[in-house]
Image (cartoon, rainbow, N blue to C red):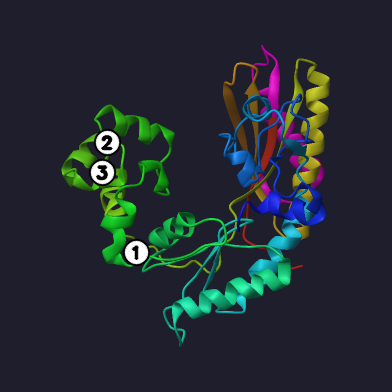
C-alpha cells in the first residue's frame, strides 16, 4: 500500500491532500516518538519511517502532525487483504500494509490480474497500492517499490542487470545499515557491485549463510516459498515514556499493565504463554532483557504479572528508563 497510514488519514482529512503530513506517536513533534509514515510531500524533505519526530520537525517544520490510529489502519488492512485473498488462496500476509500472492497456477495474464486487483482495492478502500510482478518474492518486493505510488511493475529475470543492479544496496530486502556500511568500506555501494564480487569474498566477509544470501540476492535469485499460514512465537506489549522514568514504583505499575495486556491478547487468541520476559531500554539506549520459563503454560494474568516482576527484579535499575516491554513466548493455539 502507498504511504498506508498517511493515506488512511487523508481519507478522513481530505483538506490535507498535497501537504506534508507526518504520522507518528501522539502527533506532537515536541514529544518523544518516531515517524510511522509520511506523505510523499513530506518525504521530499528527507523524512522517513523510524526517524525521531523531533528530527522530522527540523527537516520539515511546516508539516502537519497526526497521531497513530492503529484501529483504523487495521480496518483498512483487513479490506485490502480480503481483496487479495479473493484472487487466490496462495496468500502470504507480510504485515499491516503488504502481502504476497502466488499467481503461478492462475489462468490469464499476470498484468491483467494485477490491474483488476488494483481496481478492486481502490473500490473497496479508496486507497492506491503498488504491485510488483516477478519470478520470485525478492524481485516482486523490489519491483513493487520501483514505481510508487500507484505503480505496476513487471520484472523478469533478464531485467535484473538493467533495473536492479544500478540501485543502492539498501534497496535489497535483508540489507540493513550495518551491512551497507561494511560494503561501503570496500567500495561497494550498488547491487551490481555486490553481484560483481566473488561468492567466496562475500562468505569470507559476512559468513556462509549471509554471504550466500548476498550473492544470490544481488543476482535476483530467491527460492523462498509463499507461506500461507504461520503461528506467532510470541506476543508482546511495550511503551516508550514521554520522559525517562526513575521512579521504580511507576515503572512497576507499567510492567503490571503491560503484563495484563499481554494476558488479554493471549486469551483472545486462545493461546498460552510458556515463557515471560521483559525488555528495558535505559536513558543511554542500553537495552537489557530477562526471561523466565514457566512451570506450566498459562494465560493467567496474575501468573504472567508475577513472572514479569521476577524478571524485573533481576535487572540492576541504576539509571533512568526510556522504554519497557513485556513479552510472552506462546504455545500453539488452544481450543476455545
Q: Quadrant of residue 138?
A: bottom left
**251, above or below 222, in the image:** above
Q: Are marks 3 and 1 in contact (CB under 8 Å)?
A: no
Q: Which mark is residue 188?
A: 2
Q: Which mark is residue 152?
A: none
Foreground disc of the pair 3, 1: 3
Quadrant (top left/top right/bottom left/bottom right) for the C terminus: bottom right
Q: Quadrant of residue 258?
A: top right
Q: Nearer the viewer, residue 271 or 37?
A: 37
Q: Residue, x 59% and y 30% (percent of image)?
A: 289
Give SS at disc 3: helix
Label 1: few (<14), some (14–19) or many (≥20) C-alpha neighbours in 10 Å: few
Residue for badge 3: 194
Give SS at disc 1: loop
Q: Nearer the viewer, residue 115 or 169?
A: 115
**309, above or below 145, in the image:** above
Give SS at disc 2: loop
Specify start and end residues of the magenta stretch as a single range.
Answer: 294-323
Position of residue 135 measured from the top left corner of the image (x, y, whole percent): 36, 69
Horizontal side, residue 141 vs residue 122: left or right: left
Label 3: few (<14), some (14–19) or many (≥20) C-alpha neighbours in 10 Å: many
Q: Nearer the viewer, residue 160 or 100?
A: 160
Q: Residue, x 58% and y 25% (percent of image)?
A: 287
Lower position in the chain sequence, tag 3 or tag 2: 2
Foreground disc of the pair 2, 1: 2
Q: Which mark is residue 223?
A: 1
Q: Quadrant of residue 12?
A: bottom right
Lower position in the chain sequence, tag 2 or tag 1: 2
Position of residue 236 measured from the top left corner of the image (x, y, whole percent): 68, 44
Quadrant (top left/top right/bottom left/bottom right) for the N terminus: bottom right
Horizontal side, residue 215 vs residue 106: left or right: left
Amino acid at each position: 500500500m502507498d504511504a498506508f497510514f498517511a493515506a488512511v488519514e487523508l481519507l478522513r482529512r481530505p483538506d490535507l491532500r498535497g501537504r506534508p503530513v507526518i504520522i507518528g506517536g501522539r502527533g506532537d513533534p515536541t514529544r518523544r516518538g518516531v515517524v510511522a509514515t509520511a506523505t510523499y510531500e513530506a518525504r521530499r524533505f528527507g523524512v522517513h519511517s523510524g526517524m525521531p519526530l523531533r528530527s522530522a520537525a527540523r527537516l520539515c517544520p511546516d508539516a502537519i502532525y497526526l497521531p497513530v490510529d492503529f484501529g483504523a489502519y487495521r480496518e483498512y488492512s483487513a479490506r485490502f487483504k480480503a481483496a487479495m485473498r479473493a484472487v487466490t488462496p496462495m496468500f502470504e500476509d507480510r504485515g499491516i500494509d503488504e502481502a504476497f500472492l502466488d499467481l503461478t497456477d492462475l489462468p490469464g495474464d499476470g498484468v491483467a490480474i494485477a490491474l483488476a486487483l488494483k481496481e478492486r482495492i481502490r473500490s473497496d478502500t479508496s486507497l492506491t497500492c503498488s504491485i510488483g510482478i516477478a519470478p520470485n518474492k525478492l524481485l516482486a518486493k523490489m519491483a513493487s517499490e520501483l514505481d510508487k505510488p500507484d505503480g505496476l511493475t513487471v520484472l523478469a529475470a533478464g531485467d535484473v542487470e538493467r533495473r536492479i543492479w544500478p540501485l543502492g544496496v539498501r534497496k535489497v530486502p535483508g540489507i540493513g545499515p550495518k551491512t551497507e556500511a561494511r560494503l561501503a568500506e570496500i567500495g561497494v555501494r550498488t547491487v551490481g557491485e555486490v553481484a560483481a564480487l566473488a561468492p567466496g569474498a562475500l562468505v569470507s566477509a559476512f559468513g556462509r549463510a549471509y554471504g550466500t544470501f548476498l550473492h544470490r540476492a544481488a543476482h535476483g535469485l530467491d527460492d523462498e516459498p509463499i507461506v500461507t499460514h504461520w503461528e506467532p512465537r510470541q506476543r508482546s506489549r511495550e511503551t516508550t515514556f514521554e520522559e525517562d522514568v526513575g521512579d521504580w514504583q511507576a515503572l512497576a505499575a507499567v510492567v503490571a499493565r503491560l503484563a495484563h495486556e499481554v494476558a488479554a491478547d493471549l486469551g483472545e487468541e486462545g493461546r498460552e504463554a510458556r515463557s515471560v520476559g521483559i525488555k528495558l531500554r535505559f536513558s543511554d539506549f542500553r537495552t537489557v532483557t530477562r526471561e523466565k520459563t514457566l512451570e506450566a503454560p498459562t494465560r493467567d494474568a496474575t501468573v504472567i504479572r508475577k513472572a514479569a516482576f521476577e524478571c524485573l527484579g533481576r535487572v540492576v535499575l541504576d539509571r533512568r528508563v526510556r522504554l519497557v516491554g513485556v513479552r510472552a513466548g506462546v504455545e500453539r493455539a488452544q481450543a476455545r
